[in-house]
Every structure is written in structure tokens, then in C-alpha cells.
Image: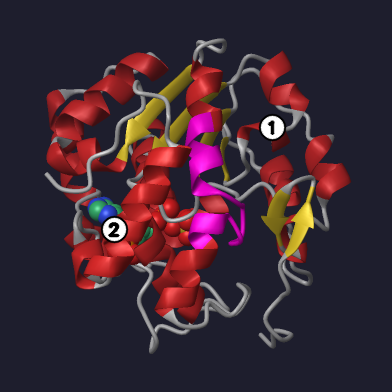
Amino acid sequence: MEFPPRPEIFDFHGVSMTQYFTRNWEKVQNFKARPDDILIATYPKAGTTWVSYILDLLYFGQTSPERLTSIPIYDRVPFMEIAHPPMISGVELAENLSTSPRIIKTHFPVQFIPKSFWEQNCKIVYLARNAKDNVVSYFHFDRMVMIEPDPGDWNSYLKRFMEGKVVFGSWYDHVNGWWKKKQTYSNLHYMFYEDMTEDTEGEIDKLCSFLGLSPSVEEKKQIRGEVHFDSMKKNNMVNYSLFPAMEFKISKFMRKGKIGDWKNHFTVAQNEEFDEDYKNKMKDPTLQFRTEI
Ligand code: PPS
């Protein structure tokens, strides 16, 4: 598929966005959520695909195993706000889903979520990743995905990330906005990439109790194996190798899956500046991230 030049970033209701995620705004805002819909919300590169695959396996791994080998994850778990014709838009894909529940992905900051999700009291899973690894992953992703603005060099990218001038805006606002929402909306399960890495099984257990699921020990073991980084990297249905617009020669979607890769990217000076700025932006002592484990 031919793609036009990389998109421009612009301010959209106070958040940096591109046309690929705003051109369907009205339709997205009018999306009719159902009470059993499950929304997976993340800042880009926080581990969305990981948690999407876990949920897909929990709900459909036993009942429709053929899905796993025939439908790529981005068609099983539609990306609500994406719209780049002639590809089918995320909203249309979600509307066409015949599964129950429908599992839907979004990178929207909390204030952009269509109101029907709140009205229907849908279950929402939010996954967050520490800022340093998140920005590194995002940088490599933007290098290889042609529907993202050109990232430029690492130093300028890091600055733009700190200023919130990357697609979907400020990481700091995103993780804080969703964290705050948790205080008033009880159907929100807030998870951390670092906890998932440290104790995948324990985090799957917590996820199951939030979702009201009780998979067998055998099933959980199977899921644990399926969602391991090495298995996902090899699995064409979840590693995005079938997705147009990605240049795998530049970088892979399943790149490293590590905590602490930021140390291979940040200079001492960049790290100091980042930490200083981080302290000013992350004032809530109840929201803590780990940059190493
Ligand atoms: S996207 O494009 O926003 O949906 O990307 P997303 O899926 O959120 O994030 C991709 C990063 O998550 C890593 N990943 C994993 N890490 C550990 N274990 C598993 N199973 C796993 N699956 C995906 C993926 O490698 C990307 O991180 P980086 O650091 O770039 O490797």
C-alpha cells in the first residue's frame, strides 16, 4: 500500500495529534459502547499489544482458537481512533466485531474517551510504562512507521517528548490523567509494564479478578507461554509483520521488550535534565514508576 508523506503534528484540543487519529473524531465520539465492551487504554508503546493479546486469549483462546492463527491482533482488538483510508477505520472495525465482549484499544488521553464508555460503565484496563523506556520505544517506533511524524534525531525527539510534542501528547498528562480517573471510576484497572515483566502470572491473576474470570491452571500456563516476549516476537499474528506502513528493516515492532534499555540511549546530561523536569511534572506521590527492576 502506498502511503502519503509522513503526517504533520498539530494541536488538537490541547493535545498533539495527527490527522490519522483525529479525522474520524465525530464518529469516534459518537461510538456506542456496550456495557460488556472492554477498553484497553495506553500511552503509545506502553505494552498495549501485550495486554491486548492476554485479554484476547482469556476471552477467546479456548472458544475460538482459529482466531489466533488467522486474524492479526489489530483486527481482533481494533484501534478505536485510527483512520487512514482506504483501510477500514478502527471505529468501523469495532462496530463490525461479532465477539462478545468486544475488546477495543485506544491511546487517547482520558478526556478524549467517548462518553458512552462512561455511561455504560465499561471495564477499562490502563497500562502504563516508565517514561524513559516509553520514550525510547516510541522513538524507534516512529523511525519505522510511515504514518508517524519523522522523529528526527534522538536528542530532539527526547526534548519533544518532554514537551508533549509527540502523537497523543504528553506522557506525563496521560499517565496522571488516567491515574486521577481511577479515583472516581471504579471500573478502571491501572497496571504497570514493569509489574507485568516482573510477575506476569501475578498480573494476569489480578487482571482476571478485575474482569471476573477464572481460567484453569492449565489455561493460565498456556497463556503465560503464548504471551512471553520471545513467543510473541515469532508470532506473525501479533508481531505486526503483516501490518502495512512498518519498515521492519529499520526497527522491529517487537523490538527488545526490556526494562532499562533507556540506559543505552540517554546520555548522562540528558538523564539529569530529564529527571529534573520529571520531578516538576510528576507531583503525585501515589503514582510511582520503576525505571529498573
Ligand atoms: S503500540 O504501537 O502503541 O500499540 O505499541 P505497544 O504494544 O503499546 O508497545 C510495544 C512495546 O511493548 C513491547 N512488548 C513486550 N514487552 C515484553 N513482553 C511482551 N510480551 C511484549 N509485547 C510487546 C514491545 O517490544 C515494544 O517495546 P520495545 O521497548 O520497543 O521493545
The answer to whether 120 is drawn above or below residue 21 in the figure is above
Residue 96 visible from this viewpoint: yes
Residue closest to the eye, 15 or 155: 155
Q: Residue 290: horizontal and vertical position, in percent?
A: 22, 40
Q: Is residue 139 magenta?
A: no
Nearest to viewer (mark 2 / mark 1):
2
Quarter the C terminus occupies? top left
Quarter the N terminus occupies? bottom right
The scheme the figure's colours follow is secondary structure
Residue 237 visible from this viewpoint: no
Question: In the shown orientation, is residue 77 left or right of residue 31?
Answer: left
**Disc 2 residue type (three-letter):** Glu
Give the quarter of the image for residue 163.
Answer: bottom right
What residue is shown at x 61% (from left), y 50% (from top)?
Answer: 79
Residue underneath mark 2: 272
Tell me which image quadrant ligand 1 sits in: bottom left
Q: Which mark is residue 111?
A: 1
Q: Residue 137: horizontal and vertical position, in percent?
A: 37, 64
Mark 2 or mark 1: which comes first in sequence? 1
**Disc 1 residue type (three-letter):** Gln
The answer to whether 148 is drawn above or below residue 188 in the figure is below
What residue is shown at x 68% (from left), y 24% (from top)?
Answer: 117
Q: Is residue 169 magenta?
A: yes
The span picked out in magenta is: 161-176
Secondary structure of the residue carrying numbered label 1: helix
At label 2, counting other C-alpha atoms closer than 10 Å, the crowd grade (few under 14, some 14-19, many 20 or more) is few
Mark 2 to mark 1: distance in Å?
31 Å
Question: In the shown orientation, is residue 42 left or right of residue 220?
Answer: right
Residue closest to the eye, 152 or 190: 152
Q: Residue 244: horizontal and vertical position, in percent?
A: 56, 77
Residue closest to the eye, 159 or 229: 159
